[in-house]
Amino acid sequence: MQSFYNETYLERYGTQLSSSLETILWSLTVSLYPLGGFFGSLLVGPLVNSIGRKGTLLVNNILSIIPAILMGTSVLSRSFEVIIFSRLVIGICAGLSSNVVPMYLGEMSPKNLRGAIGVMPQLLITIGILMAQIFGIRMILGNAEGWPILLALTGIPAVLQLMSLPFFPESPRYTLLQKRKEDKAKKALQRLRGWDDVDAEIKEMYQEEQSEKVEGQLSVRNLCTFRPLRWQLICIIVMNMGQQLSGINAVYYYADTIYAQAGVPDGIVQYVTVATGSVNVLMTLAAIFFVDSWGRRLLMLMGFGTCCTACVVLTIALVYQTTVHWMPYLSIACVIIYVIGHAIGPSPIPYVITTEIFRQASRPAAFMVAGSVHWLSNFTVGLIFEFLRKGLGSYCFILFAAICLATFLFIFFAVPETKGKTFLEISQIMAKKNGLDEITDSKEFQDLNLPIKDTTLEQPDHVNTSL
């Protein structure tokens, strides 16, 4: 791609790109993606409140298909500018989808499967990364002729979603509480659950609405100043900062260098990278089965604790890799262990918790804040890591270890367990942390006069809920 930039510039102006301009253009190509993710996160609230969760995802496909076409035809058009522009647009697409998909799935899921379903987007992301690593092997598409095709492939999942998503229901919570269409919400729930008696869930949604009437439909500004949601806001900010500033992108960036220093031949490094991506997929898959039995909090603690330890040992291994012959192999082990730790907790769980600790009126604004913190932190790591590596050398991973430790301590003392609880029950837990007394069985709920049977929210015994 950098060769294409140089060749195109030479054809236009009759001179080679200067080293500084080449660096600027390539830096823009890389960094505009997370910056676009930040802008996309800012669009979450307005879009999901106006056209719904499903509607937002449908519109968002355009922001994937158009850049894919532009990047795929960039060589034919002899324009590297369209690649840079497309990276910004596809970043906006990623910023929207990475926040709206967990919100959409979390609002549709039964409470006993909400964690597992909430981890599914991250599993599919890791599978996407693995597919990109496989297609990016030099003998497949990672070469001078194949890279435009590789970039164009990003539009295929968007086309598939554009064809299939219209057949899925809108979020029942959005349909009932924001569009005020109870019959349509009931039909969506009946279709999702597979049985007709969904009155108990409808009642729980109405109770959630009554308990949050004092909040109203919160904007980001109101959310940041609203005392009853203070700890929820702090939790999502710390968890999303910890997720990105813990160094996952830096570890991936540095992995090839670590493998090469361990004596892995250049032609084999790309296959080792694919193997690391496979580990990431397998451990994220494992998190799906553990999240609703072990709990969100435990997986987060295990993940950040593992990442912290791996960063410390990796630093030691990198410092002594030239004096102790087996240290490079320890470095490889640390990279793999770090990826395992991040995959079971820090990567997937923050999205699940963000969905759970906020209620309907505040959830869009919460995802805007969480997404903005996520993508800005991602952008920051990408921007400063090279300077950290040059300034601190191997000791840069100690900084990431410290961030992992700080996030671990915060989760241990401040983040409650939410597995198996309704949104209303979680709201009560967070109300106590905020120093408030939230009463959910008060007279206002009795006065709802809803023709709804007081049945359990769990599935009937005859329904198979296995994954």
Image (cartoon, rainbow, N blue to C red):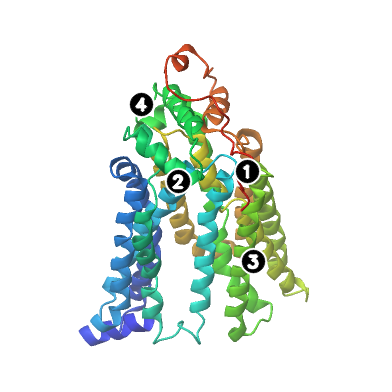
Q: Of discs 3 and 2, which sits in the foreground?
A: 2
**Residue 199 visible in rendering:** yes
Residue drawn at point x = 47 percent, y = 52 percent: 377
On the image, the x and y values in percent for residue 218 come to 36, 31
Is label 3 in contact with label 2 (beta carbons under 8 Å)?
no
Q: Which mark is residue 216?
A: 4
Q: CA distance from mark 2 to mark 1?
A: 17 Å
Dot 2 and dot 1 residues touching (CB under 8 Å): no
Above-or-below relation of 126 to 271? above
Please tell me whether residue 280 is drawn above or below residue 152 in the rendered image: above
Alpha carbon distance from label 3 to label 2: 35 Å
Mark 2, secondary structure of its residue? helix
Q: 216 or 306, which is in the foreground? A: 216
The residue drawn where x is 35% and y is 53% is 57
Q: Residues within 10 Å of mark 2 (few under 14, many from 20)?
A: few
Q: Which is nearer the N-term, disc 2 or disc 4?
A: 2
For the point 65% across and 40% down, which residue is it?
409
Disc 1 + disc 3, Cβ < 8 Å: no
Q: Where residue 260 appears, x then y in whole percent?
A: 63, 79
The residue identified by callout 3 is 279
Question: Alpha-carbon neighbours of circle 3 within 10 Å: few (<14), some, or many (≥20)?
Answer: some
- Give the spatial CA distance, label 2 vs label 4: 29 Å
Answer left or right for 222 relative to 460.
left
* Badge 4 vs badge 3, beta-carbon distance below 8 Å: no
Judged left or right of residue 313, residue 100 is left
